[in-house]
Amino acid sequence: MTSEFTNTQVNTSKRADTLDAMVLALFIAFTFGIFAPLEFYFTNINDLWFDIYDILPHLLAVTLCVFILVAAFLVIMQKISREAKVTGASESLQARSSDMNNSIYRIVMTILIILSVSLYIQGNFMEASYDKLGSETLDWSMYTAEGISNICGWTGMLAIFAVLIYKLKLRGFIRVFRTVMICILLVQLSTLIIVGISRHGLIHKDDYVATTENEWTLSKDDNYIVLLLDTYDSRIFDDLLNSDNGDDYRAKLEDFTFYRNTLTVFTLTDFSVPQILTGEKYLNQEDYGPYIERAYAESPFLNRMREDGYVMDIYTTVTLPQTGAREWMENWHKVDYVASDSFRLIGMLYRLIAFRYAPHYLKMPLEFNVELLDDVKIIGTIDGHRYTEGIDPDTFPWGNKQFVDGIPLMEASATGKKFIFYHLKGIHHTRDLDEHLNEVTDLGEDGEGVSLEESAKACMTIIDRFLSKLKELGIYDDAVIVIMADHGAASYSGGGKIQSPLLLIKGYGEKHGFRISEAPVSYEDTQEGFISLLDGHTDEDVFTVKEGVERTRTMYYTEFIGQRRRFTRNSPFIEYQTSGHAFEGHLLKKTGREYR
């Protein structure tokens, strides 16, 4: 009877140990194989080109492999610990040997539990802010405080685990954390379901993107051209005007008015470009996708363009509407992106996850440029058919080099009214053209490329070539031409927040020498100004605000948080106001309002 009872106890213990091993294997496999990458994907769905169906089969395969490997390892260890015997030893020695082997097994189980749960806590509750854009390198010396804080956090966690092991012993600790891990798994599953549904994460992505179709086809009758140079600061251009070559720049830009005192509304391209084109501000009031749909559809300027019969082409890499207003643009096409190397994509995704879940001082070798995710992005289909390079239009590249190389291809072969919006790299990093438009391969230690000043000169050379081509084709005089930036540059912000973008305007038939206006213009005025140009207004009549008027203007500065800025939680918009000149960044003052 005692023997049967003992065998029952042994069998029960075996089943319990096996269950512990299966739960731990499932926890490790699911947490790091499924939960971490999918939670990252759902949270940043609008910033990632791939959809869940591109990665889910691979994630499931990785998860299954990890589960099998961990489970097999633990089961084999469990079997060895139970069956190992000391040859020729007495029963008491055999018992002590069995206890020792069981202890080794439980120690291994305990270590794996502590490590996996700690990494889960690190990735979800102890992640510090690493202010970094994906293409830049972190200056780790700035994060000493985060490192110390992280060490303290891990010390506290390990101390708690030590106390629990002391109180519960190894067997009890494992039993308790079996329940804890099951609870965490249920929370993770619920989180994925809720976030996946709320973020429309199960929908197959069909992206409408700007292609190069008709990029160099202008109208011989009526053209409305907006040329946006990313990051081009008004103060840099002002310095060029005051340099030894200032008269040359004035001569090349005759007929234009330089609105020297212009304040941006947003300091990040993804928010500034839609605001410029539509007048609508994005302040975290809704998801970014629905905002884009609504803003473009309700844009007073774009609707007026459509009513007036303009054919519209917008060339940009910023997110475009997927319904409604997309039908107005002839160069926007439906594309389905695929990975050129699925294994590399998954590897990069798991490296991002490793960076997030690793303790602070183990993150350094895992640092990763998130822009490399785009390296494996290729077009699979366009408008429902298989994409053929050289026949179908390519997606629009925003590089300055590609643009200047295309200028000779420009032709005035279309008829009627044409609106065309070009978004170029401008002086945004990486700056790879010198002032003579030679490509620069040595980008320096910081990877930034040539100086802001030299890049600004290069952009002016591009503008000169572009305007010269318009004149050669005989379509310059009867064209509206707006040369602008989305925001300024950090080192030229005068103690401010990259607040002063370039703005140069020439209206229909406008002829005069180069002019400078000090009117306190805001990018909140873009809809008014763009429509005013449509109505034939020029020079000082483009905006209702005039020189000499005192005006309080508002700007929204984006303070990034998280180790990859836009690849983490939503960034807050902090409201600033100023009654001073746009160059006087130190006069920008917080209003106390933040939009999260």
Image (spheres, rainbow, N blue to C red):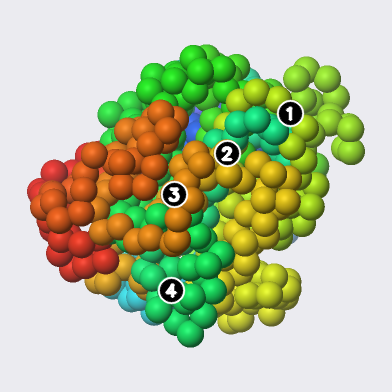
Question: Do residues under tags 2 and 3 come within 8 Å of each other at their CB atoms?
Answer: no
Camera-side residue: 504 or 513? Answer: 513
Residue 25 spot, x, y in % from top left = 57, 39
Amino acid under disc 2: Asp
Separation of residues labelled 2 and 3 (CA atoms): 13 Å
Chain-order first, disc 3 or disc 4: 4
Disc 1 target residue: 414
Chain-order first, disc 2 or disc 1: 1
Disc 4 target residue: 241
Residue at 41 percent of width and 28 percent of height: 535
Amino acid under disc 4: Leu
Question: Do residues under tags 4 and 2 come within 8 Å of each other at their CB atoms?
Answer: no
Q: Is residue 266 visible?
A: no
Quadrant placement of the C terminus? top left
Disc 3 target residue: 505
Secondary structure of residue under mark 4: helix
State whether residue 55 is above or below residue 561.
above
Chain-order first, disc 2 or disc 3: 2
Question: Do residues under tags 3 and 4 come within 8 Å of each other at their CB atoms?
Answer: no
> Badge 4: few (under 14), some or many (20 or more) residues near its Cα, within 10 Å?
some
Chain-order first, disc 3 or disc 1: 1
Amino acid under disc 3: Ile
Disc 2 target residue: 478
Q: Which image quarter: residue 497?
A: bottom left
